């Protein structure tokens, strides 16, 4: 179950101000996603929490981890941009909005993945942290893919292998690339597993 102290422990020694930001983002996202469920029946908040834990394990900064906790509040709750900006500032709002925009990418087969890469590159030019949050979001979604419809499951897994993993590799994030491939492979090539 989600526990803010576990997240703080993964982050290690941080300032009091950073700790307060993480606790605030944790509670804000928890409240925002209250009464929402994932397809497997878990509370929805587990997803942004696990995304934030992945970011913490990658050694990301406090703002990025806070944005990981908040990454779905604009898309999946009634919370407005103005509220996120008022509570967390422009930088975190920028990261959350960037992840939301990347979330609109839909994989349309190998020949169309160039468009997805173009959008990732544009996001990276603005702030690489947006792409890293999206990688963490995708990795946690891959880890719970068994609860998604089969057709959607295969599309998400193929997109992960053909777009996300190579991009992580190009960014020098070999461990993340391997984690994405390991999580996606059984859904793209079930007979090989």
Image (cartoon, rainbow, N blue to C red):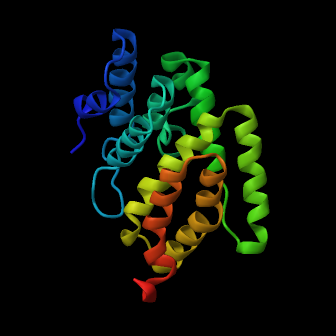
Quarter of the picture containing the N terminus is top left
110 left or right of 39 in image: right
**Residue nearest the observer in this picture, 29 or 68:** 68
Q: Position of residue 161 (x, y in %)?
A: 58, 67
Q: Residue at x 44, y 89 (%)?
A: 191
Q: Position of residue 169 (x, y in %)?
A: 61, 54
114 left or right of 51 in image: right
The quarter holding residue 33 reads: top left
Where 108 falls versus 171 (above or below)? below
Where 126 falls versus 161 (above or below)? above
**Residue nearest the observer in this picture, 89 or 110:** 110
Q: Position of residue 118 (x, y in %)?
A: 78, 52
**Residue nearest the observer in this picture, 160 or 171:** 171
Q: Position of residue 49 (x, y in %)?
A: 35, 41
Q: Residue at x 53, y 16 (%)?
A: 86
**Residue nearest the observer in this picture, 40 or 8:** 8
Is any atom of residue 175 visible in this view? yes
Q: Residue at x 27, y 55 (%)?
A: 42
Quarter of the picture containing the C terminus is bottom left
């Amino acid at each position: 179950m989600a526990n803010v102290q576990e997240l703080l422990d993964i982050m290690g020694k941080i300032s009091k101000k950073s700790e307060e930001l993480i606790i605030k983002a944790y509670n804000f996202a928890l409240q925002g996603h209250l009464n929402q469920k994932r397809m497997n029946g878990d509370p929805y908040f587990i997803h942004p929490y696990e995304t934030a834990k992945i970011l913490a394990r990658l050694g990301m900064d406090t703002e990025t981890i806070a944005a990981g906790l908040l990454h779905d509040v604009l898309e999946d709750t009634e919370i407005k941009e103005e509220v996120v900006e008022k509570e967390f500032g422009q930088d975190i709002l920028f990261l959350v909005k960037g992840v939301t925009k990347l979330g609109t990418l839909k994989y349309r087969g190998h020949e169309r993945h160039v468009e997805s890469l173009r959008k990732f590159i544009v996001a990276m030019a603005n702030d690489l942290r947006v792409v890293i949050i999206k990688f963490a979001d995708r990795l946690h979604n891959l880890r719970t893919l068994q609860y998604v419809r089969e057709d959607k499951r295969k599309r998400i897994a193929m997109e992960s292998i053909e777009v996300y993993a190579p991009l992580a590799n190009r960014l020098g994030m070999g461990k993340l690339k391997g984690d994405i491939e390991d999580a996606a492979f059984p859904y793209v090539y079930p007979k090989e597993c």
